[in-house]
Amino acid sequence: MSETATAPAATGAGTYEPRIVAFFCNWCTYTASDLAGVSRLTYAPNTRIIRFMCSGRIDPQFILTALRQGADGVLIGGCHPGDCHYSTGNYRALRRFKLLKKLLAQMGLEPERVRLEWIAASEGDRLQEVTNEMAEQLRRLGPPNLEAIPAPGPGEELPGEVQELEKTEA
Amino acid sequence: MSKPKVGFYWCASCGGCEESVVDLAEGLLDVVAAVDLVFFPVAMDFKREDVEAMADGEMAVCFVNGAIRSDEQREMAELLRAKSQLLIAYGSCSHQGGIPGLANLYSHESLMKYVYEESPSTVNPEKVRPAPETAVPEGATVTLPELDHEVKCLDQVVDVDYYIPGCAPPVSLLSNAVTAVLEDKLPPKGTVLAPDVALCKECPRIDTKPADISLAELKRPSLAELDPEICLLTQGFLCMGPATRSGCGAVCMAANMPCTGCLGPVSHAKDHGGAFIGALGSILSPENEEEIDALLEQIPDPAGTFYRYGLPASRLFARHNRATT
């Protein structure tokens, strides 16, 4: 299996179209995308949907691998809090997502690239809205620059806590 | 029959890997009796020319420790690859990037500025920095290796046959590897020469780990008291055991410290940090956003915690194909 990131999908000359890998829960968001389809809602064609039985099954490694292999963004869809088919899977997804976001920010990845939304089976319109919004945001951002090492501004080189320690020691 | 020739070299590392060779103690004498040490600059007087004079593949095995972060280290890695039948990445830095790999979080300029100008222990009013070439009054030009903008693990630079993980590698892994080489009983190429099960399996505290851990708070070893008997993760300390390979004998847990993950992930976990975040998401107890945010405040440096020994090898930062994935 090749690990090399491929060039982002492009349509026509100079137009950049982001590629979004969408991990949707079978019971809510995947059903919502079905509903959006049968309701003939049109929305950005940038998502490639992968169905999971539960958002709690989405290993952070899947998200990292998607980004590594050329996704411009990852959208995770799960059931609203309290509505998980397996009772607590979406809470696990939320905790992993929040921790992963914190890590990705430290590694220099824009926060817009990884998004978690609770979209119930009846919310086809919400799916349309979220997909359009994310596609537009990523279109504005352009492809992720994983080659670039983040360059912190003056005084931001070290985590705040370490800076505090250095001050007390200086 | 002539004895197999063995080399040992260091790149961006601290010297702890060499220490681990010395830790073989009297076992070292058996190794020295069985092999011919032809390159070991830390301990014996060999020069680069000695390696250059060898035929390709002349060394049966070469252990390289340290990450690759300068043109000189890259050249040495390529040279040793050519001269060795087996190239073994030895230690965390060579295996996954190690502590030096954390430099990938910062720009080259900010690192140089901090180290040569701003760090509390530096006095450098002329802001002198190392230059690749400097003309000296005697008329000659002296050269220094140039620091790369990115720290890499060994297999991102050259083809690697085996990996011995650890910071520094446990003595048993080294002696097992040497025995395997001498007896020609090596596993398939690309194998990490350590047990492929999570550290929890060999942890003496495993019996105190409940089936379901539920953590409402996290603790840090420097700020809280550690119970010497109970599973550290259950106590709320971030112990990387569930996502980390065993083979070290759980010596840190025996010394009452949580695992920091130096042996890297087990083979089915492709990303050490991602795997641990996955595990942690299951055992933290808060369910609403505010409580989760408050709890995660207790992890001020996720990259340095979850990728302490493997940032260059992480999914997001690994920019080059591994020989084996």
Image: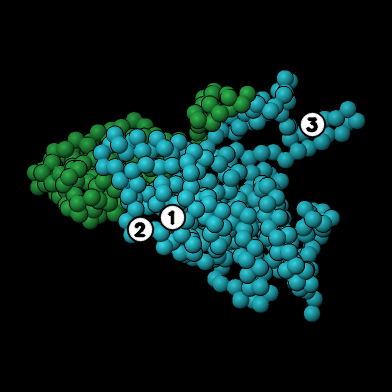
Q: Residues within 10 Å of mark 1 (few under 14, many from 20)?
A: many
Rendered image coloring scheme: by chain
Label 3 chain ID: B
What colour denotes chain A? green
Helix, strand, or loop for circle 3?
strand
* Mark before the other along the chain sequence, 3 or 2: 3
Query: Disc 3 designates what residue?
Result: B134
Query: Disc 1 designates what residue?
Result: B231
Which amino acid lies under the numbered mark 1 shown in the image of this protein?
Cys
- Mark 1 and mark 2: Cα distance apart in space: 9 Å
Residue lying farthest to the left in this orientation: A39
Helix, strand, or loop for circle 1?
loop
Taking the spot 25% from the left edge, 51% from the top edge, the residue there is: A89
Which amino acid lies under the numbered mark 2 shown in the image of this protein?
Pro
Residue B265, above or below B277: below
Give x and y (percent) for residue A55.
26, 50
On the picture, is B208 further left or further right than A36?
right
Query: Disc 2 designates what residue?
Result: B210
What colour denotes chain B? cyan
Residue B309, above or below B173: above
Check if mark 1's residue and mark 2's residue have beta carbons within 8 Å.
yes
Label 2 chain ID: B
Residue lying farthest to the bottom in this orientation: B1
* Mark before the other along the chain sequence, 1 or 2: 2
